[in-house]
Structure formats: structure tokens, C-alpha cells
Image: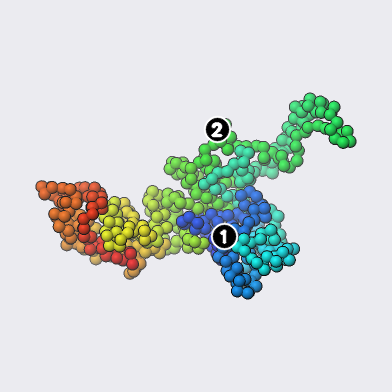
């Protein structure tokens, strides 16, 4: 189990530390926030590979953090001789008996930290000291990776040549399911882990016998004819035989099928689901890490619901890292496991009560992800409030809220306290608008007073004397003649009843009108607060 992750100089991460949850970690963030890079870095440190190929083969200049490279070039230009850019990825592991052979204190923790762990470094190769010295005389933003080497060691300072078998790890990227010859490297690894050693040996032996029989039987007649051809210079006999080398092992020839259809020809959603399910169902008592990129991709809502249930049921003691852009995944698996990423930095959700986590799990359709990713939030009671707030905000500020990074969301009947608690947990500036429903605003404020914070989280309630809901609030600050003209209703119609009955339609007509319409005071106050 990974207890701490340190990344220095790798892609978006200049100097990054994360202490993951023991079981579930849900990674959310905007595009290029660092979610995929984190999973990639974990995979590099655990496997020494990336995309199924060795890290040394895949090493390229764009692995190096741009800001650190720019700083290096700046210091070189000023006449300094800074150290060459390097990459460090460290995984600190749980102190378990089966991992003691990885134990040591050779790590970057300033205070001695003797524990099991793995270190992955990309450093200058001293064998190319002369070439690196020449490059230093006129350095460029493209680091000369040809003169670098990879050091893959455990904290006891011994080199690793393959992933320690005590650490079972699987990485599934469901965004793009890549299959080569019907089965890709990661799936082959997952399937292999489902087989016992004696089963693998038996299959390998039988596969060798099958190839041998093809050589003697199917190719026999061809080889008899080839004996007459003396192509080699020394007149030796030529013959065809099935390849018995490790390059043609049974793992590369056996492909899974789904309902008699080769795996590579199954739907992408089916492929992703199979990979995830196999990874989650591995029979292993050792440390196990499963990393899943966006499980919602290529899946219908029903299939996603089934897959998440399987993940939940099979999680056990495995440590999961799941990146997602789906509010359903976030709510269903648990908001308390949330890790928020932004430009190479990470923050965790704190202070969320188990009751609130359970509340959103039971209502997984609510778009909490919008709340998590927004810079500022405005929470309103319904769609008509949302439509009108955006209109009044545009009138006062000259642009729609989203252009200022402000997301206006309807609570759709959700409990105000639950929504406010989530905003407090992720520390988002929020303005909450609600009707007074005939109650004193002071009384309505009391149940959530402990979650409010002046200048950060504030509640705005319509004045009691102006009416119970939004519609009478509008009527109280605008002339009936103006509203009738904007709404397109006659004098014979009861204005208040029509607006109450046709809430959303009325809001849409007001929003599209070019006439000047005054905002209810509580909406104007909320606009001024959230706009800042």
C-alpha cells in the first residue's frame, strides 16, 4: 500500500507530495490538472515501464518539468552553473513483512525515514560527462536525454530489474482501449495474474508440444522438398520449424473472447469493463494497487452503475486510484475520497460528515463535480432562479457569471445544509439564494449559521414583506405594466398567479427581454458579493 508519493521535475509536477488514502482515492480536476500524470508516475515507479515499454526506451525531453528547465536555462544565461535537470519519483510503502526487502532510508525525506519504498530517477549519465559539458555551453529547452540514464532502485539502495512480485499493480485507461494482436500488454499482465504458476507451466509445455507437432506434421512435406534446395553456402539442409523461443510464447498467441468474439473486436465499453473487472477480481494477498482512468468512458448509465458496483464489491484491501470527470462516479464511490487537482497541486476534502457522504451517494445524479471544479458558486433553489440570476448578473457586471468563473447551480430540492457543507469542505466561495417561504430570514439562517463565513459563504434571502417567493419579489420592485409587457400577458390575467404558474416560461421571457428590469434586492446583493 502506498503511503506517500513524491514527484520532482516530472512533467507538470515541479515539487509534489501526496499522502493517498489507504483504500480509495478519487482524482478530479480540469484538463491538464495532473491526474493522468500522477497515475503515469506511479506506474513508472512500480513497473519501470510506460505504455507497456521500458522507461529507458520511452524517455524523451518533454518528461522534464518546463518551469524547472526554464529556471535552469535562466541561471545558465546569467553565468551560473546549476545542476542539470533531473526527475525523481518516490513511492513510500506500508511497513509490511512481505515488503521488508524494499526497506531502507535511501530516500529524499530530510528526516531519516526507514521504510519500504521505490525510487525512480532520471539523471545525467556520468559516461557522457564530456558531451554534457559541451551541451552546457549552449543549452536548449530540449534536454539531451541520450546522455541520461534511469536509476530504478528500492530504498535499500539496490537496483530493480523488474517489478517486485509482492506488489500487484494494474493500470486501466478506459479512455482509449488499445489492443495489439487482440490483447495488449496490461491485459496480458492482468490475465497472467489470474493463473497459478503450475497452470502457466502446463500451458507453456502444451503450447510447445503443439508447435513441435506442427513442425513434424504440417511442415513435414514442405521440409522434404526444401532438403533438395542447397541455398546455404556450405550445402547444409534448410527446413521450416515453429518458433520455440520466448518471443513466441503462449501469452502472445492466446487472446480472450467475449461471447465467441475476439476481445479486440468487442465494443470499447466492453473492453474497458472487462479490464477493470479482471483487475479488481485478482486473487492476491500481497499489496495491490489498481489505477483506473475515467471508468465512465464508452459506458451507458446502466453499464456504469453495474461496473461501479463491481468495483465497490471487489475493492477489499486494494488501494484504488480512480480519475474521473463524472459526478455520478464521484458521488457513488464517496465524496470523502476526493482529491482535487489544479495545475500540478492537490488538495483533499476535509470535514465532510459521513451522513453527508451517504446523502450524496443516495443521490448520485447531482452534479457535485461542478461544485468541486468551479472557482466560485451560486446555489439557487430552481431553474427559474438560475435563469433570472444570470440575467441580473449580466445587467450588473456586463457578462454572464461563467465568464468570471462563477457557476450558477440549482439545488433541485437538495437540502441546503448538505450543499453548504460540501462547499465548506472544499473551501469554495459560495452565494446561496433562497425564498423566505413566509418565514423570518433570521430563523431560516440559524440552522446553517455554523457553516456560513462572512466574505466566503453567505446566504441571501428575499425580504419577508416583499413576498414568499421569487415572483412576488419581482413584482415588488418592478411596475406591473413593465412585467406584463415583457411577459406578453394581458391586463385581464392575474400577474402574480400567471408568474407563479409559469415560473420557468416567465423567467425565460424576462431573460431574453431587452427592457430594463430591476433585480430583487437579495439577488443584487448576492451578485455584488460573488462578483467581488
Is residue 494 placed above or below 446 in the rendered structure? above
Q: Which residue is mark 1?
A: 11
The spot of residue 345 in percent (x, y) is 50, 63
Q: Tag 1, which secondary structure?
A: loop
- Observer-nearest of 221 and 317: 221
Determine the residue located farthest toward the left in the rendered image. Answer: 492
First in sequence: mark 2 vs mark 1:
1
The spot of residue 310 in percent (x, y) is 50, 45
- Name the image quarter holding residue 97: bottom right
Q: Residues within 10 Å of mark 1 (few under 14, many from 20)?
A: many
Q: Which mark is residue 259?
A: 2
Q: Which mark is residue 251?
A: none
Q: Quadrant of the N terminus?
A: bottom right
Q: Tell me the CA gap for discs 2 and 1.
A: 42 Å
- Name the image quarter holding residue 60: bottom right
Marks 2/1 in contact by CB < 8 Å: the verdict is: no
Amino acid at each position: 500500500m502506498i503511503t506517500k508519493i513524491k514527484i520532482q521535475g516530472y512533467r507538470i509536477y515541479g515539487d509534489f507530495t501526496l499522502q493517498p488514502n489507504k483504500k480509495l482515492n478519487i482524482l478530479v480536476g480540469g484538463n491538464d490538472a495532473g491526474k493522468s500524470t500522477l497515475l503515469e508516475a506511479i506506474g513508472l515507479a512500480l513497473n519501470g515501464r510506460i505504455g507497456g515499454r521500458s522507461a529507458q526506451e520511452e524517455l524523451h525531453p518533454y518528461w522534464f518539468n518546463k518551469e524547472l528547465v526554464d529556471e535552469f536555462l535562466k541561471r545558465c544565461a546569467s553565468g551560473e552553473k546549476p545542476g542539470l535537470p533531473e526527475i525523481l519519483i518516490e513511492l513510500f510503502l506500508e511497513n509490511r513483512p512481505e515488503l521488508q526487502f524494499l526497506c531502507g532510508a535511501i530516500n529524499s525525506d530530510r528526516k531519516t525515514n526507514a521504510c519500504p519504498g521505490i525510487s525512480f530517477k532520471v539523471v545525467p549519465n556520468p559516461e557522457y560527462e564530456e558531451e554534457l559539458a559541451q551541451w552546457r555551453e549552449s543549452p536548449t529547452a530540449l534536454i539531451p536525454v541520450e546522455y541520461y540514464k534511469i536509476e530504478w532502485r528500492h530504498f535499500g539502495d539496490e537496483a530493480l530489474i523488474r517489478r517486485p512480485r509482492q506488489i500487484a499493480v494494474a493500470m486501466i485507461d478506459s479512455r482509449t482501449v488499445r489492443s495489439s494482436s487482440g490483447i495488449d500488454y496490461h491485459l496480458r499482465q492482468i490475465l497472467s495474474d489470474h493463473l497459478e504458476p503450475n497452470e502457466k507451466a502446463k500451458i507453456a509445455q502444451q503450447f510447445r508440444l503443439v508447435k513441435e507437432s506442427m513442425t513434424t506434421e504440417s511442415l513435414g512435406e514442405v521440409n522434404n522438398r526444401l532438403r533438395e534446395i542447397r541455398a546455404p553456402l556450405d550445402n547444409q539442409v534448410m527446413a521450416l520449424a515453429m518458433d520455440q523461443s520466448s518471443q513466441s510464447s503462449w501469452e502472445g498467441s492466446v487472446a480472450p473472447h467475449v461471447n465467441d468474439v475476439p476481445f479486440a473486436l468487442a465494443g470499447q465499453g466492453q473492453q474497458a469493463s472487462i479490464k477493470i473487472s479482471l483487475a479488481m477480481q485478482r486473487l492476491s494477498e500481497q499489496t495491490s494497487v489498481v489505477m483506473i482512468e475515467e471508468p465512465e468512458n464508452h459506458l451507458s448509465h446502466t453499464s456504469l452503475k453495474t461496473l461501479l458496483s463491481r468495483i465497490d464489491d471487489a475493492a477489499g484491501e486494494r488501494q484504488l486510484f480512480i480519475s474521473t470527470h463524472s459526478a455520478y462516479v464521484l458521488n457513488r464511490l464517496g465524496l470523502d475520497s476526493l482529491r482535487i487537482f489544479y495545475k500540478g497541486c492537490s488538495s483533499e476534502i476535509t470535514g465532510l460528515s459521513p451522513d453527508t457522504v451517504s446523502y450524496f451517494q443516495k443521490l448520485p445524479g447531482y452534479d457535485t463535480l461542478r461544485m468541486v471544479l468551479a472557482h466560485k458558486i451560486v446555489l439557487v433553489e430552481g431553474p427559474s432562479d438560475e435563469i433570472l440570476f444570470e440575467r441580473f448578473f449580466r445587467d450588473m457586471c456586463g457578462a454572464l457569471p461563467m465568464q468570471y468563473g462563477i457557476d450558477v447551480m440549482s439545488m433541485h430540492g437538495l437540502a441546503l445544509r448538505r450543499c453548504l457543507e460540501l462547499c465548506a469542505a472544499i473551501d469554495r466561495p459560495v452565494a446561496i439564494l433562497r425564498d423566505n417561504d413566509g418565514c423570518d430570514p433570521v430563523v431560516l439562517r440559524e440552522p446553517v449559521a455554523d457553516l456560513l463565513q462572512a466574505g466566503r459563504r453567505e446566504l441571501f434571502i428575499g425580504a419577508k414583506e416583499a413576498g414568499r417567493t421569487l415572483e412576488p419579489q419581482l413584482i415588488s420592485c418592478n411596475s406591473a405594466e413593465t412585467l406584463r409587457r415583457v411577459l406578453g400577458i394581458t391586463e385581464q390575467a392575474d400577474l402574480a398567479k400567471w408568474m407563479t404558474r409559469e415560473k420557468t416560461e416567465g423567467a425565460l421571457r424576462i431573460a431574453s427581454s431587452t427592457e430594463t428590469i430591476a433585480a430583487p434586492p437579495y439577488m443584487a446583493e448576492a451578485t455584488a458579493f460573488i462578483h467581488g
